[in-house]
Image: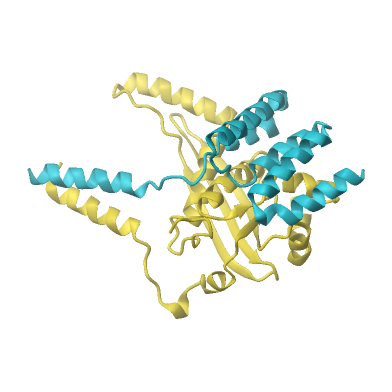
Chain colours: A cyan, B yellow
């Protein structure tokens, strides 16, 4: 009886220690690593991130910091400046900390 | 399970969850708590090891950990790309640039410098252990160090033991072969980052978006 009680307490503590996450990051870590080392997966990585961000929008959840900007940069590197700017604007809209950097970036891209 | 063992485990877990109170005069995070950064600019990682993928592996696993800790983390690949446009493609060169200059480029509150000193995989018959030596330094916008940690982390990928010696030996040999081909970079760097920022005696204080 005592043993069972202690075991239950142990289990509760174990689950209690695992903090719930603030954001849904999708496959950000694995995808970015893949992007660096498996160039043939680039298109798939971009698609995955865009799909993830769309899902967050539909659910009305706040996207993780930086994800919109990362999507923008993927498009920038593909030569699609227009789409890149759209994502940079989203990053600035969701995260005030990124606003100065994003405006400079957008300003420079529009000037070119 | 003997009752004492459970009690000991319970005690370990209880102390593990609670962050230790420390004396104010020896608190290494005093400067950090005064600066109270909202955002962290993670620079490309200086990789002094012979493993070419180690740097990007560390870089890839930092945003989630720091973001979940409550900070705005500047998008690491965007930062890396923009620095390249600015003519900075070498991580060592970026780390040597004045912090004030980097901060003004991105309008960040703080900058994280990570250096990999070594990354060694030891190939054994049944499993492969990778040992890494990493340093994490956070500087405020004026270039003062407000967080610093250097540690040696060992990682051995877990394999699913069947309890049978011979089949375990075979499956372990397979695990070792995979580890040789593409070491388990992300689990290892996640572990190292977590040890430095969360399971540290002086963990990184929670940022503005953290619920606590």
| Residue at image location 82% in from the left, 32% down from the top | A80
Q: Is residue B206 left or right of residue B6?
A: right
- In the image, is residue A48 above or below residue B103? above
Q: From this viewpoint, which residue is outermost toward the right?
A: A112
Q: Which quadrant of the view contains residue A88?
A: top right
Residue B49 visible somewhere in the drawing: yes
**Quadrant placement of the C terminus of chain B:** bottom left
Q: How many marks?
A: 0
Q: Pinpoint residue B115: horizontal percent, then vertical percent.
A: 64, 54
Q: Pinpoint residue B181: horizontal percent, then vertical percent.
A: 59, 27
- In the image, is residue B142 above or below residue B116? below
**Quadrant placement of the N terminus of chain B:** top left
Q: From this viewpoint, which residue is outermost toward the left?
A: A1
Q: A80 and B4: which one is in front?
A: A80
| Residue at image location 61% in from the left, 32% down from the top | A54
- In the image, is residue B125 above or below residue B186? above
Q: Pinpoint residue A66: horizontal percent, then vertical percent.
A: 65, 45
| Residue at image location 21% in from the left, 47% down from the top | A9
Residue A30 visible somewhere in the drawing: no
| Residue at image location 92% in from the left, 43% down from the top | A112
Q: Pinpoint residue A59: horizontal percent, then vertical percent.
A: 53, 34
Q: B24 and A61: which one is in front?
A: A61
- In the image, is residue B192 above or below residue A32? below
Q: Is residue A33 left or right of residue B107?
A: left
Q: Is residue A23 left or right of residue B116?
A: left
């Amino acid at each position: 009886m005592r043993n069972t009680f202690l075991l239950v307490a142990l289990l509760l503590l174990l689950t209690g220690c695992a903090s719930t996450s603030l954001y849904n990051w999708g496959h950000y870590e694995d995808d970015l690593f893949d992007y660096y080392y498996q160039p043939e997966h680039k298109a798939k990585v971009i698609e995955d991130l865009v799909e993830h961000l769309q899902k967050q929008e539909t659910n009305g959840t706040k996207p993780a910091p930086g994800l919109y900007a990362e999507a923008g940069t993927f498009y920038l590197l593909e030569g699609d400046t227009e789409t890149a700017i759209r994502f940079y604007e989203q990053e600035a809209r969701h995260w005030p900390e990124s606003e100065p950097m994003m405006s400079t970036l957008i300003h420079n891209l529009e000037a070119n | 399970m003997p009752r004492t063992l459970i009690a000991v485990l319970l005690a370990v877990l209880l102390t593990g969850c609670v962050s230790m109170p420390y004396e104010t005069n020896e608190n290494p995070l005093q400067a950090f708590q005064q600066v109270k950064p909202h955002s962290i600019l993670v620079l490309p990682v200086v990789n002094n090891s012979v493993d070419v993928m180690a740097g990007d592996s560390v870089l890839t696993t930092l945003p989630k950990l720091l973001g979940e800790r409550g900070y705005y983390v500047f998008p690491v690949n965007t930062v890396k790309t923009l620095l390249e446009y600015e003519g900075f493609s070498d991580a060592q060169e970026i780390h040597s640039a004045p912090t004030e200059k980097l901060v003004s480029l991105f309008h960040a509150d703080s900058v994280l410098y990570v250096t990999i000193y070594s990354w060694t995989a030891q190939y054994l018959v049944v499993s492969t252990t990778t040992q890494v030596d990493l340093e994490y330094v956070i500087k405020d916008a004026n270039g003062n160090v407000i967080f610093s940690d250097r540690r040696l982390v060992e990682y051995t990928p877990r394999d699913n033991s069947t309890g049978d010696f011979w089949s375990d030996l075979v499956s372990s040999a397979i695990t070792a072969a995979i580890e040789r081909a593409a070491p388990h970079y992300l689990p290892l760097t996640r572990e190292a980052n977590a040890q430095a920022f969360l399971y540290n005696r002086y963990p990184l204080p929670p940022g503005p978006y953290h619920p606590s």
